Amino acid sequence: MADDSKPATSSAMDDLDPVDRELLNAVQWDFPLESRPFAALGERLGISEDEVIERARKVKDASVLRQLSAIFDTRALGYNSALVAAKIEPSRIDEAAAVMSAHPGVSHNYKRNHAYNLWYTLATPPGEDFDAHLDVLHRDSGSLVTRKLPTLKLYKIGVKLDMTGTMAPNAKSTVLEHEKPERKEHMDAPELDELARRTIAVVQEDLPLVPQPFAAQGELIGCDEETVLAQLRSFKERKLMRRFAAVMNHRNAGFKANAMGVWAVPEDQLEAIGPQMAGFSAVSHCYRRPTYDDWPYTVFTMVHGRSGRDCEAIIDAIRTETGIEEHALLWSVKEYKKTRVRYFTPEWDDWTREHLAAV
């Protein structure tokens, strides 16, 4: 089942040549943190700096490439976060979804084909009461049931869409360090000075397509290029930033289907099966989450495909290799919101004043 929120744009993909596709793979996986990053990419691909920028602009104009930016670890920055499943009366799901999407900490919000039919991720800033925010969303959306599903163990996080179309459903890849950041029940907010906060506010936004983009960002921050690069390297070393990379528009990139495979992995098999599932290249997210009386699934795997059949093939490959039979496949049938959490911005205070002042 494909997401029905936007029209398909096969023509955008048809216009991409093999070099465009290699470039898209490169910027998703390893964007250079150096003065002239597009020149460095050009050296890898055998093309000029100007051509890299021109091609990057082309895939952005086609809405295949959504954004090039720093990707921060929400929990490492001291924000609390969780996946949330809500059971909504089907006739009013669009209205309920609008309530969730209006929250600045809701980055992903999808309708799925399950009794729990609205799924969203919620983050709240350091010092805020997460459950108070969740209670407001539960009440104002008219949810019948709300299930909080925080990460108990993170096996992998990192979307990498294979733009070349050569990856098999059962392909494996090593899970890199930045794809399995540390998770604890409580993570203290890091110490960040004013420069670091200003830098985060700028580098979380889209990178300008100019020869020295970090110098351009430095002008917005109020520092020089080397200071920006030093800040980014520091964020990476401190594990506040997972990576600097491209975010793709999945549908426009040809990946029109996404599905959440949920698995009832027995407690005594979790430590073996969780990493095994994460090792599938096509799995972008793999987590252990809590169970409820009406929700027996312990491991969540997100997969993306060019069609529903692709997603089914990936899930079937996981089932065959791991031997876990009890599972469900939840399709994204409507995308209400998909963005990145924006840190240290004024809309958080605005939402809190409007919705939590009385509380």
Image (cartoon, rainbow, N blue to C red):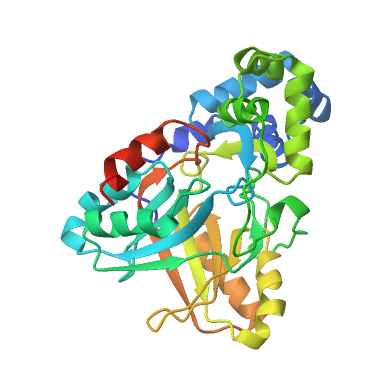
Expressed as whole percent of the image width and height from the top left, the position of residue 322 reads: 65, 80
Q: How many numbered callouts?
A: 0
5 w.r.t. 346: above or below: below
Q: Nearer the viewer, residue 154 or 41?
A: 154
The quadrant where residue 292 appears: bottom left
The N terminus, quarter of image: bottom left
Eyeballing the image, is 247 above or below 327? above
On screen, residue 249 above or below 49: below
The residue positioned 32% from the left and 39% from the top of the image is: 353
Q: Position of residue 121 (x, y in %)?
A: 45, 54
Near-viewer residue (8 or 34): 34
Is residue 96 toward the left or the right of residue 295 in the image? left
Residue 23 at what x, y percent from top left? Answer: 69, 32
Q: Residue at x 73, y 50 (%)?
A: 178
Is 198 positioned to the left or the right of 87 in the image?
right
Does any portion of residue 333 appear in the rendered image? no
Tell me where residue 52 appears, x and y as whole percent. Answer: 70, 21
Judging depth in this view, the residue of 86 and 315 nearest the camera is 86
The answer to which of 100 and 312 lies nearer the viewer is 100
